[in-house]
Structure formats: structure tokens, C-alpha cells
Image (cartoon, rainbow, N blue to C red):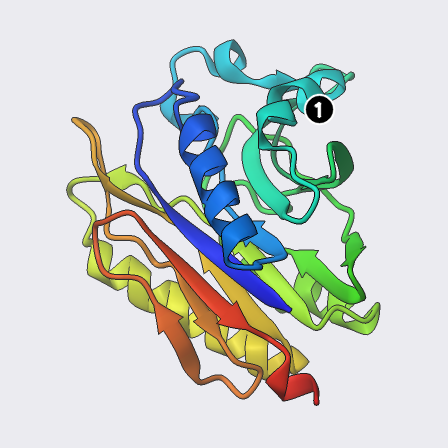
Amino acid sequence: MRVAAYQAPLLHPGSFDALALIRRRVEQCEAENVAILCCPEAVLGGLADHSDDPIQFAVATGRIGSVLAPLASDTVTTIVGFTELADDGRLYNSAAVWHRGAVAGVYRKHHPAIKRSVYAAGGDTPVFRVNGLTFGIVICYDSTFAEPAARMAAEGASVLFVPTNNGLPHSRAPEDIVAQAREADVARATDNNAWIVRADVAGRTSALLSAGSSGIVRPDGSVLRAAPAGVEDMLVADLRQPFA
């Protein structure tokens, strides 16, 4: 099976322009026989922690399908990060699995931020199955913790997708963040004998900067693909050989 990680442009908070960009990548994946496309954390709307009005660009749980409808594909399953407004009024940093025009499930980030966040903490560790592949999702900071990934691996996940958004103030060194992300990828890969597929944002806005930590790491911890710093890109890998 072929999978892809989309390193999307860092957009201004509140922007949903990424939908059109992702649609083009879905079409590229269709042409290249890619079955699963992973997009960054909060690629739709940006991180709510950077907004003065977080609910303004949140997607209500019941509206996820209508928002993701433009990404429908018969052959490509897309993992999309966004801010979810749950029925209880809480905000979650979520990633939806969009499969053949329907929401196959949602993962909610367990550790919303290092210090404080407008997001509530998720607690479930679902696994998903597409075309015989069992996989899990851990969003950004969650990948630095062993437990969520280990739970998913115990349920049969052989691939862990890591939607990421390392858009940080210009005062933070982006290269350090990339190194930390890669270190976490190698640890989760070797701990769980799993592929790690990380998709980050990259670029600069007036307030934020991200070098982009997108990469694909083999189960033995070796790096198969790494995106160039600061630019939009899509990494593709064929996962069949290690399972032969």
C-alpha cells in the first residue's frame, strides 16, 4: 500500500484555503495509486490557541462530513486535522478519517499543549482499517508520549499517522522542533515496530513560522523520507516490502 504525508503551507489563523490545496493532493494521490493521505494538524482553520475567537473557525461534530465533502474519493482516504466543536460545547484538537465520502472516525488529541490550551483533552485511542491496513493517529505532541501509540499497536496498528502543526512564534528555533519531532518518530517506530508518517505545516505568516517536520520513518527507526524545510511538499512511500 502507498501512503503520503502532505506538508501544507502555513496559513493565517481562520483560513480554510487548505481545502482546495488538499483536493489537488487527493487528485495527485489518485493518479499515483496512493491509498491514504495524511494532512497536518489543524490544517483547516489553524490552531485555535492562536485565535482571539477560537469557536469562529471550529467545525461542529455534526458538520464534519459536509465540510470534508470536497475531498471525497473512491480510492483515497484522507486524514484531516481541524478544531472540533463537540455537542457538549468543548473544543477538541481533532483529526478525521475521511473514507469514501464518510467520516470513518475521529481522533482527539490527548495532550493539547505543553502548558495550557483552549482545547479539552481527548482520551480514546481508536484504530482504523482501510484496504487491509490497520493504523492509528497520534496528533503532534501526543507522539512524544509512549502510551497512545502503544495502545494502538496493541490493537494491531502497523502504521501511525502524526498530523502536526509546528507553527510557532518567530522567536522559537524551528530546526530544534524538527529534530525533536524526528526523535519522537524514531522512538515510536522502534517501540512499536510501526511505520510513522508525519505531516506538518511549513512556511511563515506575520506571527508564526514553521520549518516543517514532515517525514516517513520505517519500523526499524531509519528515515525513509524527509520534507525540505519551509516549503510545501508531499512525501510518498510504499509500505508493502516490510510486511512481505
Disc 1 marks which amino acid? Gly
Please say whether residue 47 is visible from this viewpoint. no
Residue 115 point in image, percent of width and height: 45, 41
Residue, far right: 155
Side of 47 relative to 220 (left or right): left
Relative to residue 214, is residue 88 depicted above or below? above
**Label 1 element class:** helix
Q: Quadrant where the C terminus lies?
A: bottom right
Side of 88 relative to 37 (left or right): right
Relative to residue 153, is residue 51 depicted above or below? above
Q: How many marks?
A: 1
- Looking at the image, which residue is at 62% across and 64% down? 160
- Residue 130 quadrant: bottom right
Residue, far front: 31
- Looking at the image, which residue is at 56% across and 49% down? 30
Q: Quadrant where the N terminus lies?
A: bottom right
Please say whether residue 29 is visible from this viewpoint. yes
Residue 236 point in image, percent of width and height: 46, 64
**In front of the other: 127 or 234:** 234
Circle 1 packing at 10 Å, graded few (<14), some (14-19), many (20+), is some
- Residue 213 quadrant: bottom left
- Looking at the image, which residue is at 81% across and 72% down? 154
Disc 1 target residue? 65
Residue 95 point in image, percent of width and height: 62, 40
Side of 187 relative to 11 (left or right): right
Relative to residue 151, is residue 77 depicted above or below? above
